[in-house]
Image (tube, helix red, strand yellow):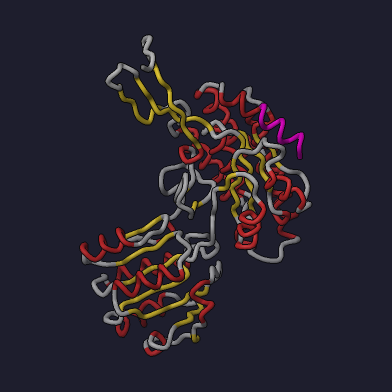
Amino acid sequence: MEAMGRAAREAAHALRNSSAETRTAAIAAMARQIRAHAPEILAANALDLAGATGLVDRLRLDTGRIEAMARSIDEVALLPDPVGAEMDRWTRPNGLEIARVRTPIGVIGMIYESRPNVTADAAAICVRSGNAVILRSGSEALNSSTAIHEAVAAGLEEAGLPHDTVQLVPVEDREAVGLLLEGLSGTIDLIIPRGGKSLVERVGREARVATLGHLEGVCHTYVHSSADPDMAVSIVRNAKLRRVTICGATETLLIDRAAAPELLPQIARALDGCELRGDAESRLYAPMKAAQESDWTTEYLAPVLAVRTVAGLDSAIAHIERYGTGHTEAIIAADPLVAEDFLARVDSAIVIWNASTQFADGGEFGFGAEIGIATGKLHARGPVGPEQLTSFHYVVRGSGQIRP
């Protein structure tokens, strides 16, 4: 692990000094190599699936998902290169010209579970932003992640970038996570965890370097009394059931008391196959189980939805403030004043009006891919793409000025 850290630091220097064109070529080569390595990736994924015990949908790859993975990388290759981009420039009265310029962070440590496609997304985003990365896949996806990493490494070599620009921890030993969190003797600049609550909590306890948090996605959809009924039914069904295992899936439905008697039964019928757990008032309008206090704080990642009837906007926002994780919240409303009030007052990474929470995704934001959804408030927030993995420094140009 210490050797991986040193190698990553050397690769980060080389990557920072490479041209944007070289980084673009490497990312495009990664996508080609993933397509070329599809049979090996599928064979490795079959080994992981054979030993899987939960969240199989997150783990499973097929030809369509591998092609989607490659397309995401292609999109990252087309993004503007952020390294060296001027964020601002101004001139002081003494003639000094000052510019704020984007720079890579350096070496990223990425710890993730279940999703082998994160291997490809993280590699592409880190190369685009000029960062070396050490990846630590969950043991349940290690065979798949290793096969994807081999394709990524082939793409790097094809473009002439160091093989160690993207490294994958080759062992399942949990001690490797601890070593990453300690910073590998100062070679790691930033840790990004992407996984369950236990992983994020461990990172919070043990990390000795900066972290970019991705907490649970207890996402809410609030149906206001002004909502168009057909729109509400369509959006809620998509937000919950399109793909239940992603962090942007709605886990709690809030609905106005004025709309619930007629609209909640329609929504319940549209959620056929989804277990509903409601408060006492919601259970008056549609068949569902009784919700427990724990349901308001649970990220189900399954066809289960908590339902609460609220008195209005203030009640909905109060519920989100108490139980939300700062990920994604949506309002369905025809009244623009109510909607804009919701968007302004709800302090989550992503707030949405009249659309599904499942748009909480870097690809849907135009980032090509994402490393995760940052739910903290420092450095980056929301989908983490290439630009979010840069820092900046100040470039000062003078003409002989000295300070009196």
Q: Is residue 238 above or below residue 71?
A: below
Q: Report the side of 338 relative to 57 (left or right).
A: left
Q: Is residue 212 above or below residue 353?
A: above
Q: Nearer the viewer, residue 100 or 167?
A: 100
Residue positioned 36% across, 58% down in the render: 351
Q: Position of residue 391 (x, y in %)?
A: 49, 35
Counting every numbered tag in the picture gives 0
Residue with the most extreme front position: 404
Residue positioned 49% across, 36% down in the render: 390
Which residues, given as a range, are shown in magenta?
A: 1-10
Locate the N terminus and report the quarter of the image it occupies: top right
Residue 5 appears in the figure: yes
Q: Position of residue 248 (x, y in %)?
A: 47, 60
Rendered image quadrant of residue 309:
bottom left
Residue positioned 44% across, 87% down in the render: 287
Q: Position of residue 352 (x, y in %)?
A: 35, 59
